[in-house]
Image: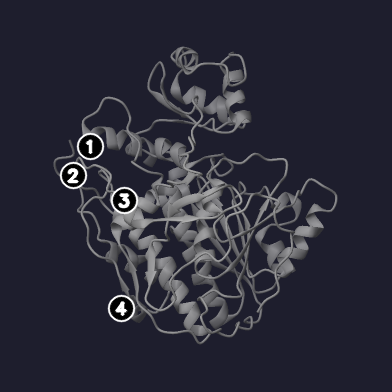
């Protein structure tokens, strides 16, 4: 057990103050938010509740500031720890059914010298792992055969060969091992939310406040993200009034979580591999205020949509980039998801030590994804505030590994066994294009403009790849 944490865990207000100050936002605004203190909501030795309260609180408070620039009301924001944590479990049902979001092959495996985690929720990733192991591809290969094959591999060797094949695998490391890794060194100089000026541009005109409006009314957000942090960011901005246009390639698969993360968004198809795809995207960029993407570093640049290219198409735009391991360093181009980044950066072994278990132990939820989603939304809005006051085009960068580094910096607590609190007080049931959707309400409470999703969640390709008219 973790008898004496090395540093006391930060409180949510302390974490928020640091985020707010790092972005250069007015300290007086912090008087307008309440983050009630709470014990652990779910069992973990990390400060999950303060991290989620602070990151979501930052996004909500920035929305209030943008609303006030447009003539909106002063208002108070409140983020309860229990609601923020439960909302970050990504729990939902469709027509009364709780989807199973994990492929049977996904998960943790023992190797000859340690452990690896495999992410196989997409068939091509699953089949690539099976192929590397010399096993039959397809859903018929049982997990036990994967375990037997991996038992003959060394963890880091399998991780390296999987990465070379474009697969999604991580070897379990201790925190100390990760800290000695060159990729951790590359993240040292990168703030958890990096906001950089891309170039000069005039301040964009502000959309006037409408009666019964929301803080981000009229803001256009182009969402090119997938699984899970980016979609959470887009859903958060939609809850504050933004027109969020989610673009999916018709050639790529999705997981069922898209039903819950598409609340409030328009959802269209656009294929950059088709002849007219890049020009159609460029036209959408010209009408956007925020361009949010989760491709691996350099992938969009190869198609002419590097941050500087986007700013040239739409001077004054805010470009938001999400990556797994950061924008620079030997792992910058490596694929990754929350569960893999947890494993690679030390969380699984740290939790195992804290709880006294022999096997690596994951965090009780995908905390990196959700905190990153809220921080992406926060960074986009902080950059919009700068744009309104200083002009310019801006680039915001967040990585899952960087969020993990931030979460570690908030300190540790002695783990407490705790059952999950009931979600019933926070649930809502909505019509959607996927079926009857039961999910949690947005966890930030506004005193004057309650957050809400004006559009139902709809499948990819439902809407045209075009902006709605501004009111």
346 or 210: which is nearer to us?
210
Identity of the residue furthest to the right in this view: 275
Proximity of marks 1 and 4: CB atoms separated by less than 8 Å: no
Where residue 165 appears, x then y in whole percent?
62, 28
Proximity of marks 2 and 3: CB atoms separated by less than 8 Å: no
Q: Is residue 337 above or below residue 387?
A: above
Spatial CA distance of label 3 from label 1 is 15 Å
Q: Earlier in the sequence, mark 1 or mark 4?
A: 4
Q: Which quarter of the figure is the C terminus placed in?
A: bottom right
Mark 4: which secondary structure?
A: helix
| Local crowd size for mark 1, using a 10 Å CA cut-off: few (<14), some (14–19), many (≥20) | many
For disc 2, the marked residue is 414
- Residue, x 57% and y 23% (percent of image)? 129
Mark 1: which secondary structure?
A: helix
Spatial CA distance of label 4 from label 2 is 30 Å
Indicate the quadrant where residue 250 lies: top right
Of circles 3 and 1, the one toward us is 3
- Image disc number at residue 31: 4
């Amino acid at each position: 057990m973790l008898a004496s944490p090395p540093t006391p865990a930060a409180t949510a207000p302390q974490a928020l103050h640091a985020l707010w100050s790092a972005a250069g936002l007015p300290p007086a605004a912090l008087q307008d938010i309440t983050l009630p203190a709470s014990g652990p909501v779910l069992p973990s030795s990390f400060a999950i509740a303060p991290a989620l309260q602070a990151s979501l609180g930052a996004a909500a408070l920035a929305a209030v500031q943008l609303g006030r620039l447009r003539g909106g009301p002063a208002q108070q924001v409140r983020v309860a720890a229990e609601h923020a944590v439960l909302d970050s479990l990504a729990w939902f049902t469709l027509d009364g059914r709780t989807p199973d979001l994990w492929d049977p092959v996904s998960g943790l495996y023992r190797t000859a010298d340690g452990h690896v985690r495999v992410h196989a929720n997409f068939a091509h990733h699953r089949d690539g792992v099976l192929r590397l192991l010399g096993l039959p591809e397809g859903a018929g290969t049982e997990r036990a055969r994967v375990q037997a094959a991996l038992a003959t591999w060394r963890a880091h060797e399998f991780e390296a060969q999987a990465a070379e094949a474009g697969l999604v695998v991580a070897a379990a490391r201790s925190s100390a091992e990760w800290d000695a890794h060159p990729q951790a060194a590359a993240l040292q100089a990168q703030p958890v939310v990096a906001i950089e000026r891309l170039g000069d541009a005039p301040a964009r005109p502000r959309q006037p406040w409408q009666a019964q409006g929301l803080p981000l009314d009229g803001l256009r957000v182009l969402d090119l993200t997938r699984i899970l942090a980016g979609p959470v960011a887009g859903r958060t901005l939609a809850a504050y009034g933004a027109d969020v246009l989610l673009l999916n390639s018709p050639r790529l698969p999705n997981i069922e979580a898209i039903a819950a993360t598409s609340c409030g968004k328009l959802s269209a198809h656009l294929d950059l591999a088709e002849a007219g795809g890049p020009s159609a995207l460029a036209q959408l960029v010209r009408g956007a205020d925020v361009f949010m993407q989760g491709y691996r570093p350099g992938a969009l640049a190869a198609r002419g949509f590097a941050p500087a290219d986007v700013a040239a198409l739409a001077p004054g735009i805010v470009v938001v980039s999400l990556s797994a391991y950061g924008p620079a360093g030997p792992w910058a181009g490596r694929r990754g998801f929350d569960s893999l980044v947890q494993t690679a950066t030390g969380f699984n072994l740290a939790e195992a030590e804290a709880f006294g278990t022999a096997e690596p132990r994951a965090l009780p939820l995908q905390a990196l994804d959700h905190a990153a989603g809220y921080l992406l939304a926060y960074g986009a809005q902080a950059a919009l505030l700068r744009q309104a006051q200083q002009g310019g085009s801006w680039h915001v960068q967040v990585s899952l590994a960087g969020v993990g580094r931030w979460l570690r910096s908030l300190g540790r607590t002695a783990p407490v066994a705790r059952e999950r609190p009931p979600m019933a007080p926070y649930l809502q049931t909505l019509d959607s294009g996927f079926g009857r959707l039961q999910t949690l309400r947005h966890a930030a409470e506004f005193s004057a403009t309650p957050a809400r999703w004006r559009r139902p969640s709809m499948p990819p390709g439902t809407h045209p790849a075009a902006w709605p008219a501004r009111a």
